Amino acid sequence: MTMVSSATKSATNLAAIAFEDDIKRLTKDFSGREWVFRDIDDWLNKKGNRFFLLTGGPGVGKSAIAARLIQIRHNIITAYHFCRGGDVETVRPGRILRSLAAQLAEKLPDYREALANSIKPELLQVGVKIDIKSVVNSKIVGVYIEKLNPSDPEDELDILIRAPLVELQKRYIERQQEPPQLAVILIDSLDEAVTTTGDKNIVSLLAKLYKSDLPDWVRFILTSLTIHLGNECIFSKGVKANENS
Ligand SMILES: Nc1ncnc2c1ncn2[C@@H]1O[C@H](COP(=O)(O)OP(=O)(O)OP(=O)(O)O)[C@@H](O)[C@H]1O
Ligand SMILES: [Mg+2]
C-alpha cells in the first residue's frame, strides 16, 4: 500500500479545465471574421498594450472567434479559459487562475520551478507550500499547493501567475536565453464572471496586472458582452464584433 502523507492529501493539484468540446461545438461551420484575426495580429505585432478586448451583443459570435483563435494561433495561445454562465467552477477567480497556471506549466518550460521559487517568504510563513511531484523518468507530473487560501484570489494571482512569469523572465536573462516571442492568455465571456462573482472577480484581478512587472511577451485577449465591466481603463484596445461580418 502506498502511504500518502496528510499534507499531500490536503494539497490542491493545479489542473486545467477541459474546453475541447466547447471549442469543437463553437467552431463547427465557422466562417468569415478575417478582419478580427487581422486586428488581433496587428495588435500582437505592436508592443505596449497588454489587454485586447473584443466586445459585442449576445450571440454575435464572440466565443466562436475565441475558439477559432485557439485553433489557428495555438502556437502563441499559451492558456485559455471560457467563463460559462450557470457553471460556477468556470467563473470563480481562484479556479480560473489554477486552470490558467496549469496550462502555463504545461506549455512553458521551467514554469513549475519558477512557481516554486518565486513564492513570497511571508506566504511560506503561513504554511503555503508548493510541492512538485515527479515520476521515475524525472518528468514532472503535477504541482500541488498546500494551504493556499482560495478566499484570497489576489494572493493566488500573485503566486500562480505574476510571480512565476516574472521569475521566468529573470531566468531567461540570467541564462541569456531568448524568452518566448509571445505567451497569450485568452479568457472568453468576462461578463459572466463579473455578473456572478463579487468584487474580487477575474476583471478586478486582471487590472492588478495592468501596471505590473509582467514581461511584455505576456498578453491577454479577452471577450465580453458590451456591459460595464469595471476597470475599463486597462483595456487599451477594443474591437466590436457584430452580426454582419
Ligand atoms: N463566424 C461564424 N461562423 C459560423 N457560425 C458561427 C460564427 N460565429 C458564431 N457562430 C455560431 O453562432 C452561435 C453563437 O455564437 P457564440 O456563442 O460565439 O456567440 P457569443 O457572442 O459568444 O454569445 P454570448 O453573448 O451568448 O456569449 C454559435 O452556435 C456559433 O457556433
Ligand atoms: Mg459567448
Image (cartoon, rainbow, N blue to C red):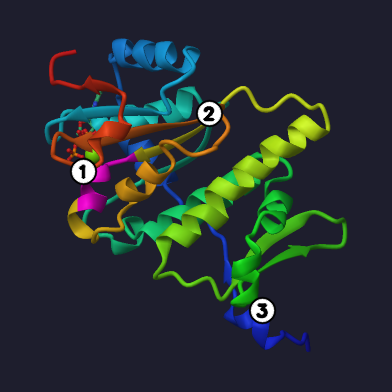
Q: In the image, what residue occupies the spot 15% across and 21% down?
A: 242
* View quadrant of ligand 2: top left
Q: Which residue is mark 1?
A: 230
Q: Is residue 58 left or right of residue 111?
A: left
**Image quarter of residue 207:** top left
Instruction: Tell me the SS state at disc 1.
Output: loop
Mark-to-mark CA distance, 2 and 1: 29 Å
Which residue is labeled 2 in the image? 74
Q: Is residue 188 left or right of residue 133?
A: left
Give percent across and percent down for residue 243: 13, 20
Q: Please, what is the three-letter code of the amino acid marked with disc 3?
A: Thr
Residue type (three-letter) at the residue carrying disc 1: Gly
Find residue 8 and name its label.
3
The type of residue carrying mark 2 is His
Mark 3 to mark 2 CA distance (whole Å): 33 Å
User: Mark 2, mark 1: which one is toward the viewer?
Assistant: 1
| Residue 81 pos. (x, y %) | 40, 45
The residue mark sitting in front, 1 or 3, is: 1
Q: N-terminal of the two: label 3 or label 2?
A: 3
Position of residue 102 relative to residue 40, above or below, is below
Identify the residue shown where x is 56% and y is 57%.
159
Q: Which of label 3 and label 2 is nearer to you?
A: 3
Q: Residue at x 66, y 54 (%)?
A: 115
In the rendered image, which quarter contains the C terminus? top left
The image shows residue 204, relative to residue 79, as above or below, that is below
